[in-house]
Image: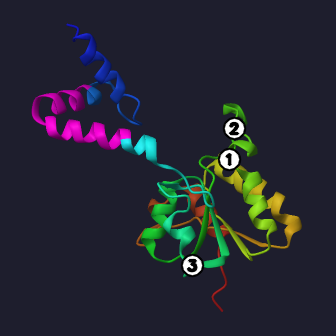
């Protein structure tokens, strides 16, 4: 059985979302059409407005409707601390901890020569321009602990080496409340390599 052309288009449109396969897309389409017309119309309006009005912060490159996001325009943040992240979602995760009071720079990805993603695609030139102004004293590299994330952090560290800025990498290791016997070998190796002195 095949659906009407417009219904097929709607189902296909949902499949652009990450993790949404044919069956999930079908369920979403049928739910909105059969049970939630108001929700569907609201989703359509908000999605269109978001696509038209949300852009990148001119300073940190996160998503915002304003030229500068709330964090970059805040006068209470520590301008000497700059944390480099792969995505705006990572920024949200760090902000939710309440443990960081500095500024951010969002790469929107990581280096991946196989996919044709180089330094210029991540705005690393903009990051270096910002660092050359001399305001930042410590650069925290918080890219993901993947091969690409590590390569990206290493590349940035090498670029910053001559600027006399302290460069640190977030620690990776055993989760709070975790038991060693259940932690994978790679995580344990990172935890041992990133150990710190207590006394």
- Residue with the mark numbered 1: 122
| Residue lying at the far bottom of the rendered structure | 199
In the image, residue 97 sits, relative to residue 39, either above or below, namely below
Q: Where is residue 197 shown, x and y percent of the image? A: 67, 84
The tag earlier along the polypeptide, 1 or 3, is: 3
Q: Closer to the camera, 194 or 127?
A: 127
Which image quadrant for residue 67?
bottom right
- Residue with the mark numbered 3: 77
Secondary element at image label 3: loop
- Residue with the mark numbered 2: 117
Q: Residue at x 34, y 22 (%)?
A: 12
Q: Where is residue 13 shown, x and y percent of the image? A: 35, 26
Q: Is residue 146 magenta?
A: no
Distance (Cα) linking label 2 and label 3: 31 Å
Q: Residue at x 55, y 62 (%)?
A: 68
The tag earlier along the polypeptide, 1 or 2, is: 2
Q: Is residue 46 magenta?
A: yes
Q: Residue at x 44, y 60 (%)?
A: 182
Secondary element at image label 2: loop
In the image, residue 137 sits, relative to residue 65, either above or below, namely below
The tag earlier along the polypeptide, 2 or 3, is: 3
Q: Where is residue 6 shown, x and y percent of the image? A: 26, 16
* Magenta span: 26-48
Q: Are marks 1 and 2 in contact (CB under 8 Å)?
A: yes
Which image quadrant for residue 178?
bottom left
């Amino acid at each position: 059985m095949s659906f009407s052309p417009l219904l097929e288009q709607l189902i296909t449109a949902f499949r652009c979302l990450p993790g949404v396969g044919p069956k999930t897309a079908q369920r979403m389409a049928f739910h909105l059409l059969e049970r939630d017309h108001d929700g569907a119309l609201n989703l359509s309006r908000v999605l269109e407005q978001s696509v038209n009005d949300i852009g990148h912060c001119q300073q940190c490159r996160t998503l915002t409707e304003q030229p500068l996001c709330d964090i970059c325009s805040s006068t209470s943040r520590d301008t000497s601390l700059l944390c480099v992240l792969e995505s705006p979602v990572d920024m949200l995760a760090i902000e939710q901890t309440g443990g960081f009071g500095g500024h951010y720079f969002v790469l929107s990805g990581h280096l991946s020569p196989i996919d044709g993603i180089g330094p210029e695609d991540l705005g690393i030139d903009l990051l270096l321009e910002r660092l050359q102004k001399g305001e930042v004293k410590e650069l925290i590299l918080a890219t993901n602990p993947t091969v690409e994330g590590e390569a990206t952090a290493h590349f940035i560290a090498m670029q910053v080496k001559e600027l006399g800025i302290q460069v640190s990498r977030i620690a990776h290791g055993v989760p709070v409340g975790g038991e060693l016997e259940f932690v994978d070998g790679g995580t344990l190796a990172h935890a041992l390599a990133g150990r710190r002195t207590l006394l």
